[in-house]
Image: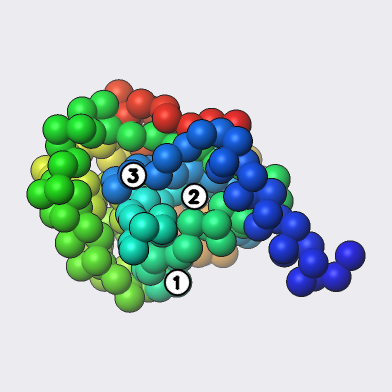
Amino acid sequence: MSTRLRLLVTVLAALLNLAAGGYEPRDGDIVFQDSGAPESLAIQLATDSPYSHVGIVFMVDGEPVVWEAVNPVRATPFDAWVARDPDGHFVVKRLENADETLDEEGAAALRRAVKAFAGRPYDFRFSWSSDALYCSELVWKAYDKGLGIRLSDPRPMGDYDLGHPEVRAQLRERFGVDVPLEEQVVSPAALFHSPQLRKVHAP
């Protein structure tokens, strides 16, 4: 199967998954997946989570896009975002009080907060500075700055499980021997387990 045909099949599978699951995208939905990026396995191992990537859904001209911190921070068409997983697997969570908080005014405030980070590079060092951002940091800071909602408590990097060889290899690649164990970090898993969110789509 050619690369182009394989991509087409994956996109179609993702769209069928979306339709079959009955998911109706809404502004502010938080979407989780395993992105398959080189660091994905290390993130999953360190945080004890099947998900390594997260973004925020917004509707644009009637179509969903996912704002995400890749390189750079940008909006990606929803079907292309989902298709990164070979099986089109994704999970969606939504604020418990989304009907009240993410009304027209709230959704606009959240959208402005996300767009303020547009174009910033991906943060391979997972720092808490906003000069560059990683995926869960973007989601956390957008909700914090746009709506005053802290979806989870950031934790020192050293609180995560850093002992697995795959995790240690990724840390060495990024930091050498100087791992910033006190750096505050928010993980996709921390967002996934936020008590302020409820699941609205899963395979």
When asked about the image quadrant of residue 8, the answer is bottom right
Q: Which residue is mark 1?
A: 71
Q: Which residue is mark 3?
A: 26
Q: Amino acid at mark 3?
A: Arg
Q: Which residue is mark 2?
A: 53
Mark 2 or mark 3: whose residue is earlier in sequence:
3
Q: Are marks 2 and 3 in contact (CB under 8 Å)?
A: no
Residue 188: x, y in percent?
Answer: 43, 42
> In the rendered view of the protein, which quadrant contains the N terminus?
bottom right
- Give the residue drawn at x 40%, y 44%: 25
In the picture provided, is 58 more to the left or to the right than 64? left
Mark 1 or mark 2: whose residue is earlier in sequence:
2
Q: Element under label 1? A: loop
Q: Element under label 3? A: loop
Mark-to-mark CA distance, 1 and 2:
13 Å
Above or below 145: residue 173: below
Between label 2 and label 3, give the one nearer the viewer.
Answer: 3
Q: Residue furthest right?
A: 1
- Give the residue drawn at x 78%, y 62%: 6
Q: Residue furthest front?
A: 62
Q: Amino acid at mark 2?
A: His
